[in-house]
Image (cartoon, rainbow, N blue to C red):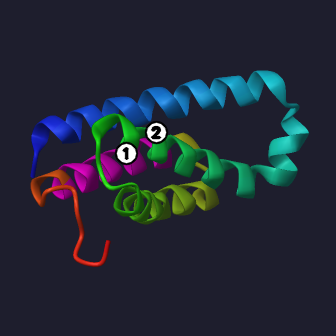
Amino acid sequence: MDRSVLWRAAACQLVTVAALSLALALALPDSFFDDWGWLSGPAAWLACAAITAWALHLNVRGVLLGAVLAGIPSAIAVVAGVHWLGVVIAIAVFACWCGWMAARGGRLAWT
């Protein structure tokens, strides 16, 4: 586990998710998220993960796979009604994935 990458991935993902969430919240009405949050949330999460992969020079496909897997707890939290707690857990899981990938040379066997 590369702890340096873990912390940088967590910080990058946190900043990009927060910035994009704020921008979307200011630009779009609440009704948009009621109707399209199920699509815009995961799309924004993946876009932020791609930025993190680029910033940390990690394999984008591997990082996006980690983002999908880390998004599972977030989806469960949304169903449970604690969306932002799910984001915090997902960022932690995502950062661990990135740290693990970096320790393996930034590659997975199938990427």
Could you say whether the residue bearing mark 2 is in a helix, strand or loop? helix
Find residue 18 and report its horizontal and vertical position in percent: 54, 28
In the image, what residue occupies the spot 47% across and 46% down? 50
> In the figure, residue 80 lies in which quadrant?
bottom right
Find residue 60 and report its horizontal and vertical position in percent: 40, 55
Type of amino acid under label 2: Ile
Is 32 displayed left or right of 40 in the figure? right
Type of amino acid under label 1: Ala
Magenta-drawn segment: 85-101
> In the figure, residue 111 lies in which quadrant?
bottom left
- Dot 1: few (<14), some (14–19), or many (≥20) neighbours within 10 Å? many
Could you say whether the residue bearing mark 1 is in a helix, strand or loop? helix
Whether residue 14 is visible to the viewer of this picture, yes or no, is yes
Viewer-side residue, 110 vs 34: 110
Kindly identify which numbered label has been placed on residue 108: none
Is 30 displayed left or right of 89 in the figure? right
Magenta: main secondary structure: helix
Find residue 26 and report its horizontal and vertical position in percent: 77, 21
Viewer-side residue, 7 vs 34: 7
| Number of numbered tags placed on the structure image | 2
Disc 1, disc 2: CB below 8 Å?
yes
Q: Check disc 1 and report the residue beneath it.
A: 53
The correct choice, above or below, for 9 with respect to 75 in the image is above
Whether residue 85 is visible to the viewer of this picture, yes or no, is no
Q: Check disc 2 and report the residue beneath it.
A: 51
Residue 94 on the magenta segment: yes
Residue 98 on the magenta segment: yes
Which residue is farthest bottom?
Answer: 110
Find residue 82 and report its horizontal and vertical position in percent: 56, 47
